[in-house]
Image (tube, rainbow, N blue to C red):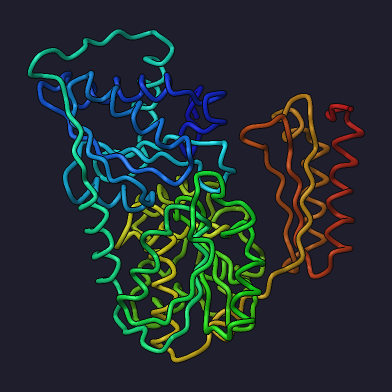
Amino acid sequence: MGKYFGTDGFRGEANKNLTFEHALKIGRFLGWYYGAKEGKKAKVVIGKDTRRSSYMFEYALCTGLMASGADAYIMHVTTTPSVAYITRVDDFDCGIMISASHNPYYDNGIKLLNGNGEKMDEETILKVEDYIDGKVEIPIAERHDIGRTVDYVAGRNRYIGYLISMSRYSFKNVKVGLDCANGAAWSIAKGVFDALGAKTYVINAEPDGYNINTDCGSTHIEHLQKFVVENGLDVGFAYDGDADRCLCVDEKGNVVTGDHTIYIYGLYMKERGKLLNNKVVTTVMSNFGLYKALDKVGIEYEQTKVGDKYVYENMVKYGHRIGGEQSGHIIFTKYATTGDGILTSLKLMEVMLAKEKPMSELAAPVVFYPQVLKNVRVKSKPEAQNDPDVQAAVRKVKEELGDTGRILVRESGTEPVIRVMVEAPENEICEKYVDQVIDVIRAKGHVTEG
């Protein structure tokens, strides 16, 4: 991770941590880097979510791009995966998504995508940061080299058509609930489900610039749970602000997480001989119950660091077809380069219809284990993590849990914190073992008091 950009872009409170000057400079650099530097005119596509500040950042990015001689193609309000798709299929030099995902409205973010629709490589990100910090000078475009903006809502429409083409079945007479989080999915999701014949019921699809993710969407799934049950729906799907993640609600009102989705679609692929390498990709935070369920059906799995970026890198490196996070970032590498909430919901619908089973039955084999996670503020993360006595305490817990649970001790990527997590058949067991390890960390003097 760089000075400004983390694993999911440059994110912060609008005009506090992330300012319009930052956006202007990002546009300036990318317009030159992909254009004048290479002796051509760069083409860059931009999308945004429904935050009020997204307009400001959109115009700042466009200004920077044009000032460096690039043409900026504006998709307006759209989803992160749609920008990734259009960047790739329409041969753009790079793509930009303005969104802070599931964060509150006053935050925003700038996500950069390469010409393949993948998250921008670290080397290029560091060059952008050097320009932001004034370490690099680049020329400004003049006369006929100055860039322009192009209305590219057609790109969003092409993406909608692509999603509709993904379905192998008609959704006729299926009652589907959608929670659009007052975000980017509001102008896309319902149209896709309607076109496929579903009886579509929508909540939180009236964005006003301030209500994105507010008590709605995948971070507040309880509202969709109630909506599905009260309206007798067959299934429900909740997206986050930029619709790159999806959580599901079955017909009984139970939550179907990203872990469930990996199991449901991974098994469906295996049964059809489509699960390459017989593996799915998870992060270290996937629930132990998922691994037990995968073991029972003979599916192997990879574990990566937390972050869909790392999941995707593993999938590309080893040729795996499905992976993701418990939070609902699911990647289908045959169809997309990023997590795609709407695509995920279509794939879950496909399994329901192909197997002619309700979602509750499809998800039932994944039984979540109780989990306790506690954060410990420490003086030095590496010293605490590598302390021989701490490591011995962790090994002891692993031995005592055996195959009935697991312990995970990892460093926070953004705070001076060690996270200690245990999953076991009972909550009391989790608490006991988490506290056991934390007691050793404290006894060895690693904890920051206060």
Residue 247 image offset from top left, x and y in percent = 54, 65
Outermost left residue: 144
Residue 58 falls in image quadrant: top left
Classify the position of the C terminus by image quarter: top right
The answer to whether one can see residue 44 in this image is: yes
Is 193 in front, or is 391?
A: 193
- Which residue shows up at 44% across the image and 77% down it? 200
Q: Is residue 435 positioned above or below 5 on the image?
A: below
Q: Is residue 385 positioned above or below 202 on the image?
A: above
- Which residue shows up at 47% across the image and 31% down it? 10
- Which residue shows up at 83% across the image and 68% down it? 426
Q: Is residue 33 left or right of residue 302?
A: left
Residue 360 falls in image quadrant: bottom right
Is 440 in front, or is 80?
A: 80
Residue 99 falls in image quadrant: top left
Q: Is residue 353 positioned above or below 330 on the image?
A: below
